[in-house]
């Protein structure tokens, strides 16, 4: 297989996230898998319209949920500012997003407003608190879903990627574990956009960046997690996060995905193994598993993510971004691009951001 270009990988990550989001719009949050099968059949293979009286009711197949809306907002800010500008991001949230929601769940663009956004709206609008004071303790993946764009923009600058993702995450989610796992996910995605694979060597590559001071995690171990030598001259770099565990998870899961003695069949049952709920500690592992198992097969990755039920939208966004980076835009089936609302605009934005990576490093 010929090597993919940086632009192909970057655009694949971005469109992969948008496609994953829209694919799960209809069958979102079915925790009863029998109900999911009754409503949508044994296998969901394309965009679907949400059923009446469900999440996203009234929307149409191929449209974006609120996660896609916020990813687009972040992407637009990056493109127009040529970098991450927190003032511009917050201005867009104030002017373009918060006026569309009211602090309740079943309103706003995309048909549903997440916990972290409801909390941020209440503190910013109802209480008048400034940015930097409105973050909450939601343990979900909302920040990771929008910072996909930041990870792509700074894929060749891991230190800037980590600090920028951490700052953007903390605007709405302040739990230390959530921030660490979000930064780790984006560091993995950046590595894939660079041209690496999601495999047993991923964590080792990330740990080298920790030791070089490029990623803000703490480490006191040497290679393969061995104890440091008593006479070692190396001084462990103490970072923002207390442990490197969020960076070690991806390779453990990649080993499981390719171990012939460990089989999850069919692969959509990864949602049962790692958990169907919304929290980061369920969503990231399932996304790593599916992306590693189907690293060059975008369609299998996102469809198994969607057919696993539960919080399948976050699972499909995250896994779609990871596999999109490895398979490239050229590896995303054309029907997914054609059926995605506003795909021409999203392709143009993705192309503009990928050009910024190549020209600005």
Image (cartoon, rainbow, N blue to C red):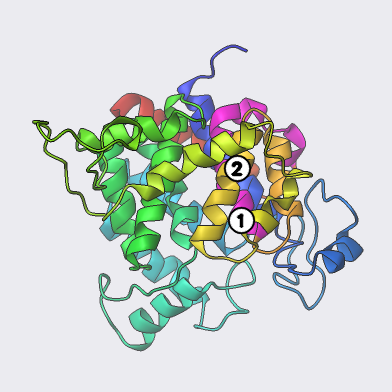
Q: Is residue 233 magenta?
A: no
Task: Decide: few, some or many residues near mark 1? Use Cα within 10 Å; few <14, some 14-19, many ≥20.
Answer: some
Q: Is residue 326 magenta?
A: yes
Mark 2 and mark 1: span between their CA atoms? 9 Å
Residue 176, percent across and down? 32, 63
Residue 258 falls left or right of residue 355:
right
Vertical arrangement, residue 85 with respect to residue 251, above or below: below
Q: Under tag 2, what secondary structure?
A: helix
Residue 71 falls left or right of residue 20:
left
In which image quadrant can residue 50 be found?
bottom right
* Residue in the image at 37% along x and 88% along y: 126
* Residue in the image at 79% along x and 69% along y: 32
Residue 347 in view: no
Q: Under tag 1, what secondary structure?
A: helix
Vertical arrangement, residue 342 with respect to residue 91, above or below: above
Vertical arrangement, residue 223 with respect to residue 238, above or below: above
Residue 328, percent across and down? 58, 28
Task: Decide: few, some or many residues near mark 2? Use Cα within 10 Å; few <14, some 14-19, many ≥20.
Answer: many
Q: Quadrant of the C terminus?
A: top left
**Is the residue under label 1 in contact with that under label 2 (CB below 8 Å)?**
yes
* Residue in the image at 72% along x and 44% along y: 264
**Residue wearing tag 1:** 274
Q: Work out whether residue 338 or residue 224 is closer to the camera in this orientation and state it.
A: 224
Residue 316, percent across and down? 63, 50
Q: Quadrant of the N terminus?
A: top right
């Amino acid at each position: 297989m010929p090597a993919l270009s940086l632009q192909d990988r970057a655009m694949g990550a971005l469109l992969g996230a948008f496609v994953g989001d829209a694919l799960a719009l209809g069958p979102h949050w079915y925790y009863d898998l029998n109900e999911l099968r009754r409503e949508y059949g044994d296998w969901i293979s394309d965009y679907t319209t949400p059923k009446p009286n469900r999440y996203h009711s009234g929307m149409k197949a191929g449209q974006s949920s609120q996660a896609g809306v916020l990813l687009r907002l972040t992407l637009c800010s990056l493109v127009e500012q040529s970098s991450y500008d927190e003032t511009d991001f917050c201005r867009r949230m104030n002017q373009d997003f918060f006026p569309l929601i009211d602090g309740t769940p079943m309103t706003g663009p995309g048909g549903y407003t997440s916990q972290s956004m409801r909390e941020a709206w209440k503190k910013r609008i109802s209480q008048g608190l400034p940015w930097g004071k409105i973050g909450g303790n939601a343990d979900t993946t909302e920040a990771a879903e929008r910072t996909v764009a930041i990870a792509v923009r700074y894929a060749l600058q891991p230190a800037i990627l980590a600090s920028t993702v951490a700052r953007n995450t903390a605007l709405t989610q302040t739990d230390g574990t959530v921030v660490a796992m979000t930064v780790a996910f984006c560091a993995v995605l950046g590595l894939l956009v660079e041209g690496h694979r999601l495999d047993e060597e991923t964590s080792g590559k990330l740990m080298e960046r920790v030791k070089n001071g490029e990623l803000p995690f703490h480490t006191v171990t040497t290679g393969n997690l061995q104890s440091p030598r008593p006479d070692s001259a190396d001084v462990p770099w103490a970072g923002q996060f207390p442990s490197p565990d969020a960076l070690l998870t991806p390779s453990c899961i990649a080993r499981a995905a390719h171990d012939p003695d460990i089989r999850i069949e069919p692969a959509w049952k990864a949602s049962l193994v790692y958990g169907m709920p919304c929290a980061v500690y369920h969503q990231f592992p399932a996304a790593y598993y599916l992306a590693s198992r189907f690293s060059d097969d975008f369609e299998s990755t996102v469809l198994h993510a969607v057919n696993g039920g539960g919080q399948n939208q976050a699972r499909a966004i995250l896994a779609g971004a990871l596999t999109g980076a490895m398979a490239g835009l050229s590896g995303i089936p054309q029907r997914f691009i054609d059926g995605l609302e506003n795909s021409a605009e999203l392709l143009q934005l993705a192309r503009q951001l990928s050009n910024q990576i190549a020209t600005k490093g």
